[in-house]
Amino acid sequence: MSGNEFDLINRYFKSQPVNRKDVVLGIGDDASVISVPENSQLVVTTDTLVAGTHFLKNTDPVKVAYKALASNLSDLAAMGAVPSWCSLALTMPKLDEVWLKGFCEGFYKLAEYYHVQLIGGDTTRGPLSLTITLQGIVPADTAIRRDGAKAGDWLYVTGNLGDSAAGLDVILSGLAPKNSTEEILVERHYYSQPRVLAGQALRSVASSSIDISDGLITDLVHILKASNVSAIVNADQLPVSEELLQFVDNPKDAAKIALCSGEEYELCFTVSESQRDKLDAVLLDTTTPITCIGKIYPGEGLRVNWKGKSIDWPLSGWVHFLKNK
């Protein structure tokens, strides 16, 4: 990009609403310098979004920015971390000031809400894509990991599942939403709420956790393999919204979508019997709804039940947009 283009981009990314006291040196030098609190550990995650794969090329940049940052926030939420600093690598085919302005609007709105400061990054010319590296902190040795589930633990999820996939179906149809139900589902696809506060609250009770970005049946298997356990999921107990039920008009179809829908940014976590009675208390201030959907067992594998009977539905994990869409 030309010098003038870099100047313009720098103006957008230097004028941000969050200025943390622990940022010693932010945007403008070869690297950033931050102060990490004593007795804390750094938690770092990186996600890349590519136009045509993770979002349609004509998607509102406000929504693109929200989705990009929310996916990283959700990763930190799963580990109970407090999000703090991020860097952004942005590749654009050409400088589009209108797009950049919308992107910054969406990015900074969410960053300000979680008190995250942009501390650096990179810009270059090429196919539209963006990579965010988000850093957060946890008290030493308290991060929630995937490998802590034990036989006898109860299996929970936050919020509702399935709305993101249903919203994507509406988007990919190429047609405008036909009613308020479809409008709501589209908004929930773009604006899934990362469970940052719930993740921090769960540090004291959860034995394992993961965010639901690739579908419940895919992400739960990561916990099972890391912990060397198995699980039974009761599909009839999955939390689904009224809008999803209206969209598919069948509880079983809603459950199938809930099992596979990704980019939900809800949390799937396990809790031991001894900690189960503390859940409501630790989550009270977060106002996060939770649902028990099953249990952890010895052995390997994942079984899905419907009203107590094993089912064999053809299920697959989340599939992102096809390229060149």
Image (cartoon, rainbow, N blue to C red):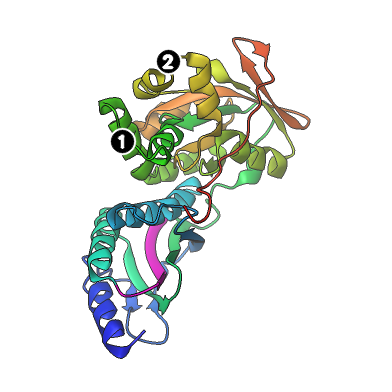
If you read the primary sequence from the N terminus, does the residue marked by circle 1 or circle 2 appear first?
Answer: 2
Left or right of 72: which side holds 220? Answer: right
The residue identified by callout 2 is 249
**Residue 202 appearing in the image:** yes
Judge by depth and name the residue closer to the eye, 319 or 205.
Answer: 319
Left or right of 137: which side holds 104? Answer: left
Instruction: Return the mark for residue 232.
Output: none
Residue 172, by quadrant, is: top left
In x, y percent, where is residue 219?
59, 40
Judge by depth and name the residue closer to the eye, 206 or 290.
Answer: 290
What residue appears at the point 49 percent right and 56 percent down from the top-left corner? 324
**Residue 275 appearing in the image:** no
Q: Gap between marks 1 and 2, in whole Å?
A: 34 Å
In x, y percent, where is residue 27?
32, 79
From which residue to which does the magenta span run?
A: 82-95
Image quadrant for the N terminus?
A: bottom left
Q: Secondary structure at mark 1?
A: helix
In x, y percent, where is residue 243?
35, 23
What residue appears at the point 41 percent right and 87 percent down from the top-left corner? 30
Q: Secondary structure at mark 2?
A: loop
Left or right of 95: which side holds 300? Answer: right
Figure check: 293 above or below 209: above
At label 2, the amino acid type is Asp
In x, y percent, where is residue 18?
24, 65
The residue identified by callout 1 is 285
At label 1, the amino acid type is Asp
